[in-house]
Image: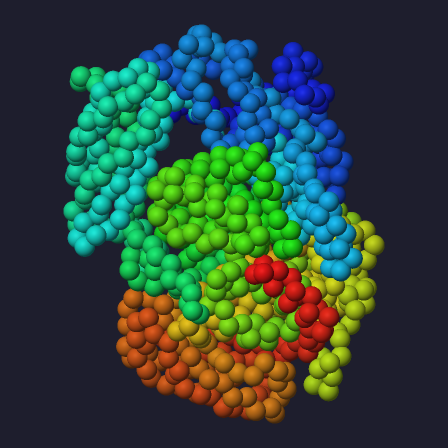
Amino acid sequence: MIDLGGRDWEFGSVEPGPRDDDYERVREWRPASVPGGLHADLAALNLISDPYVSDNLETSRWVEERDWWYRKSFRRPSDARRVFLVCLGIDYRSTVYVNGRRLGQHEGMFSTQSYELTDLLETENLLAVRISGARSLPRLKRSLRDRLEQILARALFQAELYPERFASLKCQMSYGWDFAPRLPNLGLWDDVLLATSGDVWIRRVRIGATPIDNQARLDVALDLDARVASTVVACVQILATNGDIIVEQPFPLALPDGPSTHRFHLFLDQPTLWQPWDRGEPCLQRARVILEHQGEQLDVAEESFGVRSVELVRGKGRWSLRVNGEEEYLRGTNWVPADAIYGRVQAEDYERLIAQAKQANVNVLRVWGGGLREKRAFYEQCDRQGMLVWQEFPFACAFFDRFPSDQTHARLVEQEARSMVDRLYNHPSVALWCGGNEFNPRRNRHIVDNLSLALRYHGDSRPFVPASPGGGDAHNWRVWHGQANLGDYRRERAPLLSEFGLQALPDLATLRRFLPLRLLPSEAAPEEKTCPVGELKLPAPHSRSRSANRKPDSSAAVLAHCGVEGELERLLRYHCAQFDKLARYAAPYHPGSLTELIQATQRAQAQGLQVAIEHYRRHRDRTGGILIWQLNEPWPAVSWSIVDYFGTPKLAYRWLKDLYNPVLVSLDYPLRRYNPGDRITADIWVVNDTRRDYPACELTCKQAGREVWSRRLDVPTGGLMLAGRVETTVVGKRELDVTLTFEGDVLSHNFYDLAYHDPAGISTRDRIRNWITWRALEI
């Protein structure tokens, strides 16, 4: 493969229209980068302002009104008998030309386009790609019934049914979401390659590696393209890490003229299994396939793979993922695209974010259905770092409505889904496929069946879940969207909780990177300079006499008290801040400035995650895991992320390191406000997700720095144990610390803020609306 990516591309625009042969109408060609995106190229040339700063994005809407051309010159490979162009992702409607010859039109951003160039190439060549503008994206055809349902949903739930995004399999988030802007990407967002070969080209190598006793069965599928019918030998080699051949086996193949697929298997003795990082080493193998005809090498391809098994046990109150025959308790986060201009995400961006997740003891990333099939580098990083991936197809949020069911859309789904399965087939980190996010599988049976067929077409044996939530998997948005009390998390009984969370403002330094400086404090408040995030001494929470039924101060009052008004408030809302809910959960701290509001929202977010995560992990005997919403964000925003767009962690991220520690020490106590002189009683639990015992540990509990309880104990592997109960009187600082040590080193630590109390509860109206919304996913 020869990578055609780089900064030596050019782009230009033309008037929109149905013609795709208007290359000569481009008035000016400017430099561009591939992979990338149109907005990134324009911003790099200062033709638009940075779309992430302030509300600059609105000034670049003209971009959507034009159609665009990209081009690149390249030389014919000198030693190739056959040459193919391979485009891994063009967003969204495109026409490809080489040397003025039209190769084909395409719709869809996830599917691979391949074209043979052998007879078209000269010494110097020109590749040109025409991309239709955002105004040319497919429009949804709504029936009379659909339009009537739209009217009803607006009246009853202020919900918009049958949005335009349903008409395409484009990244759904790019149409605008509650944490992302409406930014319809255009461009060559994934790799563009030249493939060279002899008379037979190896299009793809897929390897399924299943452990069986002390062996691994390797099921190999070769997609080949032969210039003429012939008989060849496919020699499959399995390589050691030092490059030595440990297994070699030839397979004679009779090839027809054109494309064909061939399947066979071989065995690998005493394989080292690929394990999630918290269970062992993520061992990767390497396979080489050499095609020969009468001693002449026609083509060669290499792929990495891992030997591992995955099983999902679901139903009757169970949701459990088993990797290599052992239960893997999921401590996860939701992953959204790392950039709203997703084409410019680089391998190092993936590496940094996945490493941050791993450092927080995360063992699974749910690639959310409103996002992407990420680039290859994402899955390679997950393979190397032992990070499990829950991959969703690009369908999201159809509560009361349905995705299109016409034949044109069905063919598009088949095309895109098959390509996604093909691209991810060899990655051992991909442990689970899911049809998408928050839609009803019964009303969308046509979609689910099509996705199932795509998996069967390629022989992908990974577990497939029709949609999330469903079948024992829950999303809790009573907290936050329903404004329920944080204690509501303790009411969850679903075996798996795969979405929940609270928004929090990013640090002031982050706000200064995307908001006008004149609207922000000229410098950090003195306490922010000296105190880490989360240790700022906020005003005391509401007094105990406050009625539990009384609502907190209105969001307008909280914002006014913090100086968040006028243009600053408008821009923060533009960047996705939901101030009615932010203020509702921050209000117990009585923030009195922007700095204090930042601190209060981050502490409330961390507090909420702590309540939910510890509740689930204390019930690991009947739960299979928990995944927070969300790890990252695609632009500078006020969102649910625990790591902001620039990579700066929020307080919740630091807490998560303790909450997701494979060995957790947790206190279970009544969630109320504790004042000095109050008695508190807490059960002390120890959770061990690891595969080893920890004998003779020391467990201590301190209140305001004084030891109030201690015990020596053995912590068994894979265990859940009630270690004891602490009863004490609250004095001084209203906080508890609990620490588990092993051989003098801290094995687990946890902290509890007894001052924070959330007195408000969900209204009856919101409870009913919430029940109807989530029930719609099941009926």
Q: Residue at point 59% right, 76% down?
A: 487
- Residue most extreme to the right: 566
Looking at the image, which residue is at 68% across and 30% down? Answer: 136
Does 638 sit left or right of 555 as displayed?
Answer: left
Rendering coords of residue 759 (x, y %): 68, 78
Nearer to the camera, 725 or 425: 425
Rendered location of residue 555, percent (x, y): 77, 65
Dividing the picture into quadrants, the one containing residue 465 is bottom left
Q: Residue at x 70, y 64 (%)?
A: 582
**341 in relation to 476, above or below:** above
Nearest the eye: 585 or 95? 95
Q: Residue furthest front?
A: 144
Q: Is residue 578 left or right of residue 630?
A: right
Residue 669 can be seen, yes or no: yes
Residue 125 coordinates in the image, percent (x, y): 49, 11
Q: Quadrant of the C terminus?
A: bottom right
Name the foreground residue: 463 vs 645.
463
In the picture shown, does residue 44 fall above or below 295?
below
